[in-house]
Amino acid sequence: MPSSAATPLPIVIARTGGTFEVLRGRLGDFADWVRTGLAAEAGGLPVTVVDAAAGAPLPEPGAIAGVVLTGSHAMVTDRAGWSEGLGRWLARAVAARTPVLGICYGHQLLAHALGGEVADHPDGLEIGTVEVHPEPAAAAGDALFAPLPAAFAAQVVHHQSVRRLPPGAVRLAGNAFEPHQAFRVGPCAWGVQFHPEFGAAAMQGYIDTLAPELRAAGHDPQRLGDAVRATPEAAGLLPRFARLCARGA
């Protein structure tokens, strides 16, 4: 997508929800964490936030360099009006070959918008720092996943998941709990169930905030917290995505 040097196309962060208020005051919000991850490799492109969950319209896909969809505490299966509208916009963005990166809720919405299936995970909540395994054949030539090792650590927190990938999607990574940790549709639309934008403090904050729910579900918050660590390989997806957007802008 050509653009004039005077008016570079923006990378848009589509905000689909926010974190807990207790974490927001101390650590910032989803969109802040995504912006930080993109910043180093954005190549001078502006990074703007659109509050999609509040009904704010996104620009036409051809008018942006790329889009990142944040996570949310909402559920794709609720079929909220703003979410369904964003899904229709996503389908147009994929058709236009606008770079897309959907994170957690954004990952699930991308799958739903393109004909996949999203539902509650049969084993309930996945939370904490987990190991993710790229699919070697699929990830080898992938712009975002090729640099990753055979196993890498990632932060996760989700009740729902992509139960069936959209037609034509390529599975890029999974683990024993969640086979669809990452997929790609077309040349430049990715969904990741894990959170590349989460630092260790954010992950610990989720475990602490959800501790009563975790105990009720049979999880041990202390054990989960002890396993939390930094996830630099997963975090590297954001600057690589920004670099891809900058090359095409």
Image: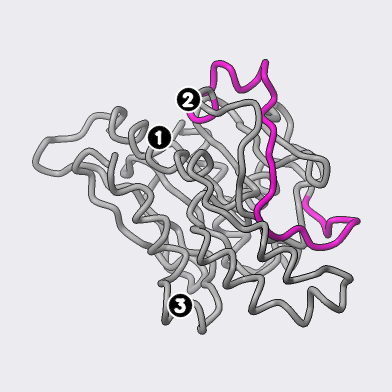
In the image: residue 143, left or right of residue 48: right
User: Percent from the top left, x then y, of residue 186?
Assistant: 57, 26
Residue 247, image x, y percentages: 29, 28
Is residue 134 found inside the magenta-colored segment of the image? yes
User: Residue at coordinates 73% horizontally, 37% vertically from top-left?
Assistant: 174
Relative to 221, is 120 above or below? above
Tell me the distance, in whole angstroms, between the alpha carbons under discs 1 and 3.
26 Å
Spatial distance from mark 3 to mark 2, Cα to Cα?
A: 32 Å
Residue topped by disc 1: 240
For the residues bearing labels 2 and 1, Cβ distance under 8 angstroms: yes
Q: Are marks 3 and 2 in contact (CB under 8 Å)?
A: no
The amino acid beneath tag 3 is Arg
Crowding around mark 3 (Cα neighbors within 10 Å: few <14, some 14 to 19, many 20+) is: some
Q: Which residue is mark 3?
A: 24
- Give the foreground label among 3 and 2: 3
Region rendered in magenta: 118-145
Name the amino acid type tagged 2. Answer: Ala
Mark 1, Cα crowd under 10 Å, few <14 / some 14-19 / many 20+, is many
Tell me which amino acid carries mark 1.
Arg
User: Where, by quadrant of the figure, is residue 170 drawn?
Assistant: top right
Q: Quadrant of residue 204?
A: bottom right
Residue 143 numbered tag? 2
Q: Is residue 117 left or right of residue 18?
A: right
Which mark sits nearer the N-terminus, 3 or 2? 3
When the figure is inspected, residue 70 is found, relative to residue 19, above or below; the finding is: above
